[in-house]
Image (spheres, rainbow, N blue to C red):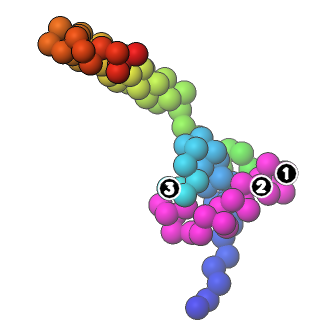
Amino acid sequence: MKRQNYSNEFKVQVSKEAFEVGNKAGVARRYEIGPNLLHRWIRQYQEGHFDDVDPSAIPNRQVGEVAKENDRLKQLLGEKDLEIAILRDLVKKKNPHLLKRLK
């Protein structure tokens, strides 16, 4: 099996994505590389081994996209909290003996 060489730009892009997403194993699967290799790239990136990379060559996520995603996730969290509150109220009304277990 032939060993594959990756460019520094690719290494930085994948390292940044793994850092932003927080799921290193998922990013490694997406790019079909080993998780240990990705961990090594992230460590090298943090130590500054990829300083020769032009930052404009690396595509960054737009601030607007991140803000939209953040708003969507806040809305989902609010809906889940409301759903949990409604279900707790139903349990209290129908089965008061289960109230002790909820606390």
Residue at the spot 79% in from the left edge and 57% down from the top edge: 44
Bounds of the magenta span? 28-51
- Counting other residues with Cα less than 10 Å from the Cα at mark 1, is it few (<14), some (14-19), or many (20 or more)? few
Q: Earlier in the sequence, mark 1 or mark 3?
A: 3
Q: Do tag 2 and tag 1 residues touch (Cβ < 8 Å)?
A: yes
Residue 82 visible? The answer is no
State the residue position of label 2.
43
Q: Main secondary structure of the magenta part?
A: helix
Where residue 83 appears, x then y in whole percent? 26, 18
Asked whether 76 falls inside the magenta stretch, the response is no
Q: Give above or below for 89 relative to 36.
A: above
The amino acid sitting under disc 1 is Glu
Residue 89 visible? The answer is yes
Q: Give above or below for 70 relative to 14.
A: above
Residue at the spot 58% in from the left edge and 44% down from the top edge: 22
SS label for mark 1 = helix
The amino acid sitting under disc 2 is Arg
Residue 36, quarter of the rendered image: bottom right
State the residue position of label 1.
47
Q: Tell me the CA gap for discs 2 and 1.
A: 6 Å
Residue 84 shows which numbered tag? none
State the residue position of label 3.
26
- The outermost residue toward the left is 94
Residue at the spot 63% in from the left edge and 79% down from the top edge: 4
Q: Is residue 77 left or right of residue 46?
A: left
Where residue 21 appears, x then y in whole percent? 55, 43
Q: Give above or below for 43 relative to 78.
A: below
Residue at the spot 69% in from the left edge and 59% down from the top edge: 39
Q: Nearer the viewer, residue 32 or 88?
A: 88
Q: Earlier in the sequence, mark 3 or mark 2?
A: 3
Asked whether 41 falls inside the magenta stretch, the response is yes
